[in-house]
Amino acid sequence: MENMPDSGIVEKARAFVEQECLKPTSHYGSEIFIYHFTPVHSYAKKLAEELGADIEVVEIAAWMHDIGSIMLGRKEHHITGAKITEEKLREWGYPADKIERVKQCIINHRGSQSLSRATKEEQIVADADALSAFDNISGLFEAAIFHEGFNQMQARAEVKRKLMNSWEKLSVNARKNVEHKYLAAMILLGDD
């Protein structure tokens, strides 16, 4: 049955991402696994189940969506992450047609890019990524200040920009879940 995930391949993706986050070379430290990847996976799996999407594709893409940032840095991480994911999935013997579907989810997950999301799996991963941002605003500040090198004023603007981008990429249904958080954040972050 297509909708039932292969727990082995999903676990390999999860373990690979966790291992990369724990390395000293991780661009965002180890906490990103707990505070970003894990919530993205939880949101994505729940949405995939609710919407009848391919759960396996969604779970793998949710685990791997930011691997490019962890290993190579934020710039073009949707592209580098898709390449890294393709290499790992081929190594693990994953079917080529499903690799392409996972890659498209990763390529199209970013809120800062005007990307078309052609499948519900792509939209689910984008939604899950955006939803997690509203649950971890302190982590967005940490990334902006400590990992991107912004000062406090720049970090506030960066976090506001990130939340606005996340809001814009959310589907109408997903927006209902975090509208109150978005409005509160915009009030707290104030005018630029």
Image: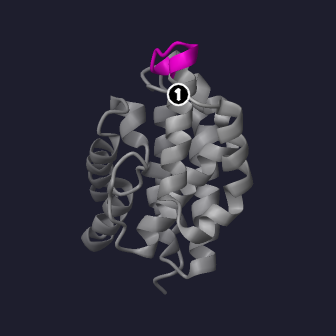
Find the magenta span and give its range. Answer: 147-154
Q: Where's residue 147, x and y in %?
A: 48, 20
Decide: few, some or many residues near mark 1? Use Cα within 10 Å; few <14, some 14-19, many ≥20. Answer: some
Residue 15 visible in rendering: no
- Is the residue 140 above or below the residue 11 in the image? above
Of all residues, the one furthest to the front in this rendering is 191
Name the residue at 58% across, 15% down.
152
Name the residue at 47% across, 57% down.
169
Q: Where's residue 173, x and y in %?
A: 61, 71
Disc 1, SS: helix
Q: Quadrant of the C terminus?
A: top right
Count of numbered tags: 1
Q: Where's residue 113, x and y in %?
A: 34, 49
Q: Amino acid at mark 1?
A: Ala
- Is the residue 24 above or below the residue 185 in the image? above
In magenta stretch: residue 149: yes
- Is the residue 49 above or below the residue 128 in the image? below
Q: Nearer the viewer, residue 27 or 177?
A: 177
Say whether residue 119 is left or right of residue 83.
Answer: right
Q: Quadrant of residue 34?
A: top right
Q: Nearer the viewer, residue 158 or 190?
A: 190
Residue 158 visible in rendering: yes
Name the residue at 33% across, 46% down.
78
Q: Where's residue 142, x and y in %?
A: 59, 23
Query: Which residue has dot 1 on it?
Result: 157
Q: Nearer the viewer, residue 129 or 54?
A: 129
Say whether residue 82 is left or right of residue 189.
Answer: left
